[in-house]
Image (spheres, grey):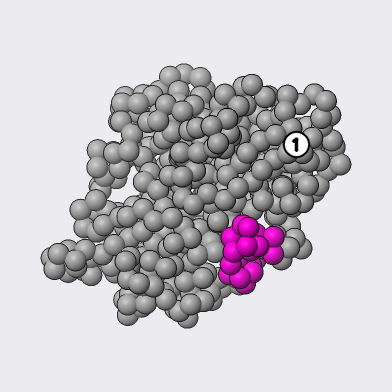
């Protein structure tokens, strides 16, 4: 297998962004813990401040703190603090812990790139925190059209609302972030232009249900536990779970400021080892109940355990009569290389951000991915953790990805993918 090549690629030129597209790599759902310990005397610091949003996919950071995985590798003074929104997370990363902010965070995978490019705050992605586990949920009033994976059923309602000058309002969590991209892809696949036919509004994840309750928004895309909470309060239903759109899609990432990692390489590895072991722990079915109890605590999510538990176990109550147990697209923290930060996935995120005008079309996608994505540090931490070599991907690419509408994304040919999409802003 070969890694994505170092050859420069400009997305406008159609020059290949990668060499050989490689098969999936070595999948495993092994969730072993290890007793390997870092030597704290070699760490540049034992302190770090990390942020999280109240979403189930932040569990690895919370568990690493609460179960002692950070301390196990010498990081005894790690603070994991709740952030009110993704813009607040961004702003606190900008100022860093020295200015009263944070050094790293649970974050939407495209955000470290948007910060590096638009905000001139160099960031690193050290790991993917999870795959799958988000949903697009809609208000009760849409039950009559049986809205699901195909958004075409919404097109007539969207046109009527637009004609009446009361366009349907969709909440996303951050412009250019994963939830924004899932919502835009879903709408566009059904012939709905997200920039012209509806309104997309940023809303912090913990405020999604409240906004739906008062009618401020008609639908939202967010992670758990907020979709499950909407259903439990009988305020709406989940049209789809995002794994149905793209099987095992990448979602959140563990990001750190570049300067912090560069100044504290051993401490950064210790942090990453703690996160990876927490991901292994979170993956185990026998730990799901405890994971949800930890996260439900007032200082973290402040929700009922039941709002988190069932979907974490793969039991999906859509809220419209559909119920699925042992759902194949439930959130994964470690299984099937969920933690590995494939560069090919980041190429897709950036291509979609170009599609919708968040990034310039002539940017050097390959160069920025190589700058921000530190899969090399992931491999080093995984090796130190004792992950068998056969379970560590040897390629930067997971290969060609296929979406629910039959569209394929080849990370070697992002320009071809972009040109094939009928609805886009560029």
- The residue that appears at 85% across and 37% down in the rendered structure is 36
Relative vertical location of residue 16 with respect to residue 244 in this rendering, above or below: above
Determine the secondary structure under disc 1: loop
Which residues fall within the magenta stretch?
Answer: 293-313
Q: Residue 378's x, y, as percent?
A: 66, 33
Q: Residue 409's x, y, as percent?
A: 42, 42
Q: Quadrant of the N terminus?
A: top right
- Snapshot quadrant of residue 166: bottom left
Relative vertical location of residue 120 with respect to residue 57 in this rendering, above or below: above
Out of 261 and 281, give the one closest to the viewer. 261
The answer to whether residue 105 of the structure is visible from this angle is yes
Q: Is residue 363 left or right of residue 62?
A: left
- The residue that appears at 46% across and 38% down in the rendered structure is 91
- The residue that appears at 39% across and 56% down in the rendered structure is 203
Q: Which residue is mark 1?
A: 75
Q: Quadrant of the C terminus?
A: top left
The answer to whether residue 130 of the structure is visible from this angle is no
Q: Residue 411 magenta-drawn?
A: no
Q: Is residue 17 left or right of residue 325?
A: left
Q: Residue 307 magenta-drawn?
A: yes
Q: Residue 297's x, y, as percent?
A: 65, 62
- The residue that appears at 62% across and 26% down in the rendered structure is 261
- Snapshot quadrant of residue 71: top right
Out of 403 and 64, give the one closest to the viewer. 64
Q: Residue 320's x, y, as percent?
A: 44, 78
């Amino acid at each position: 297998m070969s890694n994505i090549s170092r050859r420069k690629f400009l997305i406008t030129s159609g020059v290949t962004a990668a060499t050989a597209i490689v098969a999936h790599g070595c999948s495993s759902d092994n969730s072993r813990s290890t007793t390997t310990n870092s030597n704290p005397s070699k760490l540049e610091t034992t302190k770090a401040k990390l942020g999280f949003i109240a979403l189930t996919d932040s569990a690895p950071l919370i568990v690493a703190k609460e179960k002692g995985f950070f301390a196990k590798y010498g990081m005894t003074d790690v603070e994991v603090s709740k952030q009110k929104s993704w813009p607040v997370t961004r702003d606190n990363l900008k100022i860093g812990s020295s200015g009263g902010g944070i050094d790293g965070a649970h974050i939407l995978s495209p955000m470290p790139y948007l910060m590096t490019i638009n905000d001139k705050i160099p960031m690193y992605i050290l790991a993917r925190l999870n795959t799958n586990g988000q949903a697009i949920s809609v208000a009760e009033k849409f039950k009559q059209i049986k809205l699901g994976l195909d958004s075409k059923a919404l097109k007539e309602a969207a046109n009527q609302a637009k004609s009446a000058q009361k366009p349907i309002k969709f909440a996303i969590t951050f412009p250019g972030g994963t939830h924004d991209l899932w919502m835009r892809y879903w709408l566009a696949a059904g012939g709905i232009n997200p920039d012209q036919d509806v309104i997309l509004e940023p809303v912090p994840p913990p405020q999604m249900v409240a906004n739906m309750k008062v009618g401020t928004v008609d639908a939202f895309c967010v992670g758990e536990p907020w979709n499950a909470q909407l259903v439990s309060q009988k305020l709406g239903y989940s049209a789809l779970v995002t794994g149905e759109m793209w099987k095992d899609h990448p979602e959140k990432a563990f990001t750190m400021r570049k300067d912090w990692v560069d100044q504290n390489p051993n401490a950064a590895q210790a942090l990453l080892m703690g996160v990876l072991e927490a991901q292994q722990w979170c993956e185990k079915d026998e730990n799901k109940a405890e994971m949800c109890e930890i996260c439900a605590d007032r200082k973290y999510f402040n929700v009922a355990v039941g709002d988190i538990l069932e979907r974490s176990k793969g039991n999906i109550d859509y809220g419209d009569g559909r119920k699925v147990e042992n759902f194949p697209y439930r959130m994964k923290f470690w299984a099937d290389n969920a933690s590995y930060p494939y560069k090919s996935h980041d190429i897709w995120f950036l291509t979609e951000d170009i599609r919708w005008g968040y990034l310039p079309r002539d940017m050097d996608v390959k160069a920025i991915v190589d700058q921000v994505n530190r899969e090399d540090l992931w491999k080093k931490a995984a090796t130190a953790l004792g992950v068998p070599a056969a379970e560590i991907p040897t390629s930067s690419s997971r290969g060609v990805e296929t979406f629910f509408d039959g569209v394929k994304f080849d990370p070697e040919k992002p320009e071809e993918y972009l040109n094939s999409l009928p609805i886009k802003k560029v």
